[in-house]
Amino acid sequence: MNTLIGIVAIVLIFVIVFQLAKTSELMGILKGDKEGDTSESTNNTHGFLMMFLMITGLIAVFLGWWLVEDKLLQGNRNFTPASKHGDSINSMFWITSIICGIAFVITQALLFWFSYKYRARKGNKAQHFSHDNKLEIVWTVIPAIVLTILVARGIETWYEITADAPADARIVEVTAQQFNWTVRYPGSDSLLGKREFELISGENSLGIDWNDAKSHDDLMPTEIVLEKNKPVLFKLGAKDVLHSFYLTHFMIKMDCVPGIPTQFWMTPTHSTQEMRDLRGNQEFDYELACAELCGRAHYNMRFIVKVLETEEYNAWLAEQKPFYDAIKATLNPAPAAAPVEGTAPTEATDSTTVTPAIENGSVDTEVESKKNVISSL
Ligand SMILES: [Cu+2]
C-alpha cells in the first residue's frame, strides 16, 4: 500500500511541475513573448535550479557515503583487510576513489556553474571558437597521465595477486555446488588424491579415486581453517553451475567454473581473534560467500573461515582424521593400502584411461553405465 501511495505521489509531483512550466510559458506569451521563446525569468530560475542541484547533489553524494560508511567493507576508512593482497587492493581502491572523486567534483562543479553563469540573458552573446590547441592539450594530457598511473598501479597489483604461489604455500581445495562448499586438505604428503568425475556418487560427492593412495590421508573438514602469516593456495572448482569464491575480509574473489580449474593464493595477516579484538566484536567470524547468483538457495552458501595462530593451527590439524578412514569400511573391496613402486595407477588424462576405483558394487555399475552412454553417442 505504501509503495502505491509513493508511486502516486511521484506521478502527482511530475504533473504539478509540468503544469507549472506550462503556466509560466502561457504567461510569457500573454506578456508578449513569442511562442517557443523562453523568458529571462525562466532562464534565471533554471540557472539557480542548476546551482541548487549541484550543491544538494554533491552534498547528497558525500552525505550518503558518510551515513552508510560503517556498513561498508570497501569504502570504510576503518576497514582493515585481513590479507597482504587485501592491503594492496584496499590502498589501490582509496587512491582510485580519491583521484576520481576530485575529478568528479571539479567536472560537475564546472558543468553546473557554466549552466548558471552563461544562461541566456538579454545582451549576452555566445562566443564561438572552433579550436584551441592549449585547451585540447590540457584536457587530453592530464587525464592520460592520471589514467596511466592508475592502470599501471592496477596491473602491478594484478600481477602480484595472480603470481605463482610460494613453494611452501598450504593447499586447500574448495569445490562449489548448489548450495554448499566441499573442502579438502592434503594430508602429510602435501598431495591431494586424484579425482574423476565418473566416480561421483551419493557417497563420493567429489569423485575421489580411493585407488589412489594419495587420497588416503586427505582431510575433509566442514570449515576452512588457515594459519596466520602462512601462504595458502586455493584450488577451486564447481560441479554444476558458475559460483564465485568470495573471501570478503581478505578482499579476494575468484570464480568457480565447472570443468575449468581456477586458483589463487594469499597470506592471511590477522587471526580471527585479532580481528574480533580489532572490530570490538567477539562474535565476529570471517566468512566465505558465493558471489555468483547461482540459484534459489544461493544465500545458503555462507561458510565459516577461521584463521589461527601457528600453535592453534597445528593443534587443529592434529585433531583431523583422514576422510578415507571413515569410509574405507564401506568400500568393497578395499583399495590397496599403499601404492607399490612402479605399479601405481597412472594419472587419468581423459575418461578412457580411468581405472575404476571399485571393481564391484554400485559405483562400478554406475561408471560402466555412464561409459555405455558415452560410447553409444
Ligand atoms: Cu553459488
Image: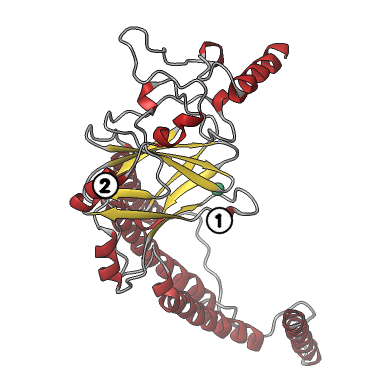
Direction from residue 72 to residue 313 in the image, left or right: left
Coordinates of residue 80 in the picture (x, y in percent): 29, 63
Vertical position of residue 314 compared to residue 324: above or below: below
Direction from residue 265 to residue 49 in the image, left or right: right
For this rendering, which residue is in front, 358 or 349? 358
Look at mark 2 in the image and give the residue it sits on: 267
Q: Look at the image and name its color scheme.
A: secondary structure
For this rendering, which residue is in front, 24 or 246? 246
Direction from residue 9 to residue 269 in the image, left or right: left
Vertical position of residue 254 compared to residue 327: above or below: below
- Furthest-top residue in view? 342
Distance from disc 1 to disc 2, alpha carbons, whole Å, reads 26 Å
Q: Is mark 2 within 8 Å of ligand 1?
A: no
Regarding residue 144, the answer to whether it shows in the image is no
Look at mark 1 in the image and give the residue it sits on: 300
For this rendering, which residue is in front, 81 or 150? 81
Front tag of 1 and 2: 1
Name the residue: 55% across, 56% down. 300
Q: How many marks?
A: 2
Q: Quadrant of the N terminus?
A: bottom right
For this rendering, which residue is in front, 164 or 36? 164
In primary-sequence order, the first of circles 1 and 2 is 2
| Three-letter residue code for mark 2 | Thr
For label 1, the SS is helix
